[in-house]
Amino acid sequence: MNSEETLELLRRSVADWNRQRSERELGEIDLERCDLAELDLSGADLRRARLMRADLMGARLVGADLRRASLVGSYLLGADLRRARLDGSDLRAADLRGARLEGASLRDSLFLTAAQLESATGDRTTRLPRRLPRPSHWSD
């Protein structure tokens, strides 16, 4: 499946996308530099997806599975990542300003920095790598 077909399937229906992922292997999921801004991708199975430099500004990714996804240089400004699974994802240079991380799991995320966390919002249910402190402005 090429990038355009992949993107069209994802934009059409997260349920159809997830069904395709569970029924057959879609191969490498390459969404590099794709415009996914403002889309509702809640619950989407994006494990191991290549989302490098993707525009996810304002996207709704509530409960999305982004484990081991490459989000290098992606734009997640104002994205809703509540309860998303980002374990093992590569967040190098990802812009998380204003992103909502309440209940998200970021354990074992690669290259996640304290500065990225400071620019986002989270709470006590957000699971962070042990090496990073919970920002003081996050709610309890």
Image (tube, helix red, strand yellow):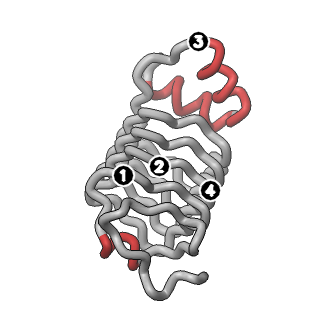
**What residue is pinned by disc 2?**
86
Q: Secondary structure at mark 3?
A: loop
Q: Position of residue 113 (x, y in %)?
A: 29, 67
**What residue is pinned by disc 1?**
109
**What residue is pinned by disc 3?**
24
Measure the alpha-carbon separation of dots 2 and 1: 7 Å
Marks 2 & 1, CB-CB < 8 Å contact: yes
Q: Secondary structure at mark 2?
A: loop
Q: Position of residue 110 (x, y in %)?
A: 30, 51
Identified by mark 3, the residue type is Arg
Q: Residue at x 57, y 56 (%)?
A: 59
Instruction: Tell which tag, 3 or 4, sits nearer the viewer.
Output: 4
Marks 4 & 1, CB-CB < 8 Å contact: no
Identified by mark 1, the residue type is Ser
- On the question of residue 53 being in view, the answer is no
Report the residue that reaches farthest toward the bottom.
Answer: 137
Query: What mark, if any, has residue 83 been given in the picture?
Result: 4
- On the question of residue 98 being in view, the answer is yes
Measure the alpha-carbon separation of dots 3 and 2: 23 Å
Judged left or right of residue 72, residue 75 is right
Residue 32 vertical placement versus 53 (above, below): above
